[in-house]
Amino acid sequence: MKPRDGRPLRRTYRILRWLWRRGDRPDRPEPAIAIENSVTPNVLICLETGTRHVSLRRHLAETLGLSPDEYRRRWGLPDDYPMVSRNYLNQRNKTLFGGLPKAE
């Protein structure tokens, strides 16, 4: 039996290495909206789907099966990236803590 020549394998390896170095494989997927524009006072826009949400946490869990930490890690977001819109949070806090009658 004749020994196999390793040239085709080496050639394939060189092509794959060249493609890898060229950067054809993105590290992160392309977001549906620019990260800077994804946080507004009234809504948060999901980077995966481009949909608007007051609370992003529920959408992530039910639709995408991601935890907030996994979502932040996937998109390279800081740990303090909000999961609830600011106006919703303020209204909820006002209702919970400011709307109670004071005991006299």
Image: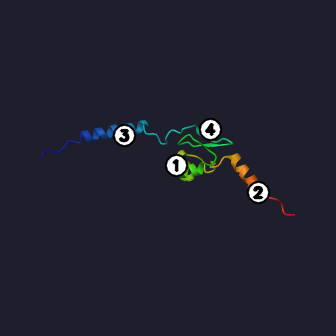
Residue at far bottom of view: 104
Q: Residue at x 25, y 39 (%)?
A: 8
Tell whether 20 sits left or right of 81. Answer: left
Residue picked out by circle 4: 37
Q: Earlier in the sequence, mark 1 or mark 4?
A: 4
| Number of residues whose C-alpha sits closer than 10 Å to that of mark 3, classed few (under 14), some (14–19) or many (20 or more) | few
Q: Nearer the viewer, residue 88 or 67?
A: 88
Q: Residue at x 64, y 46 (%)?
A: 54
Disc 2/disc 1 C-alpha distance (Å): 31 Å
Q: Amino acid at mark 3?
A: Arg
Label 3 sits on a secondary structure element that is helix
Q: Earlier in the sequence, mark 2 or mark 1?
A: 1
Indicate the quadrant where residue 75 lies. Answer: top right
For the residues labelled 3 and 1, say whether their Cβ atoms are less than 8 Å apart.
no
Residue picked out by circle 1: 63
- Spot occupied by residue 17 in the image (x, y as percentages of width and height): 36, 40
Residue picked out by circle 2: 97
Label 1 sits on a secondary structure element that is helix
Disc number lying in front (2 or 4): 2
Any mark on residue 17, and which? Answer: 3
Disc 2/disc 4 C-alpha distance (Å): 30 Å
Q: Earlier in the sequence, mark 3 or mark 4?
A: 3
Q: Nearer the viewer, residue 95 or 86?
A: 95
Label 2 sits on a secondary structure element that is helix
Tell whether 16 sits left or right of 52. Answer: left
Indicate the quadrant where residue 10 lies. Answer: top left
Q: Quadrant of the C terminus?
A: bottom right
Q: Amino acid at mark 2?
A: Phe
